[in-house]
């Protein structure tokens, strides 16, 4: 049974992340989407809110589970019995960071493999910061995020 984790900040989850999950479920028996508490980033949504939005957005996937972690990503992978770490590669600009992280994670835990998946080209320019910025100024983000995220953004920014 091949289980993988897909870690990220998910502040908030976007359709680009969902695209990666769609691809991962085709390849692995179980995918755990895991929210990093990540103290190095100031987040708009709490960990609990991010987990809730992921649960709602991914509820139709029976082999997907959501949790969160604090600390090293490889420690969490070991804790849940995952054989690999999924990461998304949107453009060449992501590569250096992902490559460095994959090699460091391999050094920390040689038995955990990083798998880089490419989302659809339409998500190349998308990230959570752009979504937050647009929503903050009441821009239309409906084509970039699942309905639950749109609802939460509208509540947060009162529009
Ligand atoms: N579609 C849309 N956006 C995407 C995307 C996709 N498919 N894949 C990534 N992104 C965006 C995210 O929305 C995020 O945007 P933002 O910075 O504007 O918020 C950005 O790309 C970064 O992606 P994310 O996956 O959230 O990565 P991160 O750099 O925040 O790192 C962890 C998250 C969990 C991997 C990292 O913090 C970590 O490993 N933490 C644990 C500590 C650790 O183990 N360190 C050792 C590793 S070397």
Image (cartoon, rainbow, N blue to C red):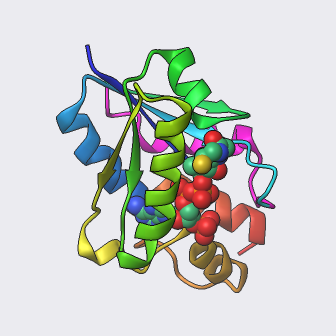
- In-image side of 97 versus 84 (left or right): right
- Quadrant in which residue 111 is drawn: top left
Image location (x, y in percent) of residue 106: 46, 38
Whether residue 62 is situated above or below residue 39 in the rendered picture: above
Whether residue 154 is situated above or below residue 21 in the rendered picture: below
Q: Is residue 13 visible?
A: no
Whether residue 22 is situated above or below residue 122 in the rendered picture: above
- Residue drawn where x is 32% and y is 52% of the image: 116
The quarter of the rendered structure image containing the N terminus is top left
Q: Considering depth in this image, is 115 or 125 the residue closer to the camera?
A: 115
- Residue drawn where x is 61% and y is 25% of the image: 75
Start and end of the magenta stretch?
42-62
Image location (x, y in percent) of residue 135: 65, 77
Q: Is residue 79 visible?
A: yes
- Residue drawn where x is 52% and y is 40% of the image: 105
- Quadrant in which residue 63 is drawn: top left
Q: Considering depth in this image, is 44 or 9 the residue closer to the camera?
A: 9
Q: Considering depth in this image, is 152 or 125 the residue closer to the camera?
A: 125
Q: Quadrant of ligand 1?
A: bottom right
Task: Report the residue that reaches farthest toward the front.
Answer: 107
């Amino acid at each position: 049974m091949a289980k993988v984790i897909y870690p990220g900040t998910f502040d908030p989850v976007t359709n680009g992340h969902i695209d990666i999950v769609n691809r991962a479920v085709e390849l692995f028996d179980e995918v755990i989407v895991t929210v990093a508490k990540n103290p190095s980033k100031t987040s708009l949504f709490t960990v609990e809110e991010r987990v809730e939005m992921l649960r709602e957005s991914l509820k139709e996937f029976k082999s997907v589970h959501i949790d969160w972690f604090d600390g090293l990503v490889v420690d969490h992978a070991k804790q849940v019995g995952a054989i690999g770490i999924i990461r998304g590669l949107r453009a060449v600009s992501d590569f250096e960071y992902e490559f460095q992280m994959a090699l460091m994670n391999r050094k920390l835990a040689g038995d955990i493999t990083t798998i880089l998946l490419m989302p659809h080209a339409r998500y190349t320019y998308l990230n959570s910061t752009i979504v937050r910025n647009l929503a903050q100024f009441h821009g239309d983000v409906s084509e970039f995020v699942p309905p639950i995220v749109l609802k939460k953004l509208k509540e947060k920014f009162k529009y």
